[in-house]
Image: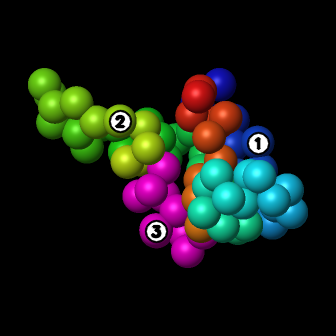
């Protein structure tokens, strides 16, 4: 399952006003599961990080406004 990319990475423009306000923009990035795996493996043992930080990291790297939250299991 981890290596099934499901055509990711990809971008999608959203038009729902509530979602745009909630996430701070309309350009949504879909990160592949392997990227989440790689990012989590970089976190030192014993350190706690919240998933929002990983989403912000992916959005910043990809040039998107936010990262799609469902893929990460939220």
Task: List the residue tagged with mark 3.
Answer: 61
The secondary element bearing badge 2 is classed as loop
Estimate the spatial distance between the alpha carbons at disc 3 and disc 1, rounded to whole Å: 20 Å
Q: Is residue 58 magenta?
A: yes
Q: In the shown orientation, is residue 41 left or right of residue 22?
A: left
Q: Sequence-wise, which precedes: disc 2 or disc 3?
A: 2
Outermost residue on the right side: it is: 15
Which residue shows up at 81% across the image and 66% down it? 13
Give residue 71's quadrant in the image: top right
From this view, report whether residue 15 is shown above or below residue 73. Answer: below
The disc label shown at residue 69, or none: none
Residue 32 percent coordinates (x, y) = 61, 46
Give residue 46's quadrant in the image: top left
Q: In the shown orientation, is residue 13 left or right of residue 35?
A: right
Which residue shows up at 22% across the image and 30% down it? 48
Q: Which residues are magenta?
A: 55-64
Residue 66 percent coordinates (x, y) = 58, 59
Which residue shows up at 73% across the image and 66% down it? 26
Q: Quadrant of the N terminus?
A: top right
Q: Sequence-wise, which precedes: disc 2 or disc 1?
A: 1
Pointer 3 local density, CA inside 10 Å: few below 14, some 14–19, many at least 20: few
Q: In the shown orientation, is residue 48 left or right of residue 36?
A: left
- Given residues 9 and 4, the one toward you in this image is 9
Task: List the residue tagged with mark 2.
Answer: 50
Q: Are marks 2 and 3 in contact (CB under 8 Å)?
A: no
Q: Sequence-wise, which precedes: disc 3 or disc 1?
A: 1
Q: Is residue 31 magenta?
A: no
Residue 34 percent coordinates (x, y) = 52, 41
Task: List the residue tagged with mark 1.
Answer: 6
Q: In the shown orientation, is residue 11 left or right of residue 32?
A: right
């Amino acid at each position: 399952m981890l290596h099934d990319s499901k055509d990711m990475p990809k971008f999608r423009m959203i038009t729902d006003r509530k979602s745009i306000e909630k996430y701070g923009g309309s350009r949504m990035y879909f990160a592949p599961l392997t990227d989440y795996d790689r990012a989590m493996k970089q976190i030192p043992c014993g350190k706690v990080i919240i998933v929002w930080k990983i989403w912000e990291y992916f959005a910043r790297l990809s040039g998107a406004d936010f990262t799609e939250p469902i893929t990460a299991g939220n």
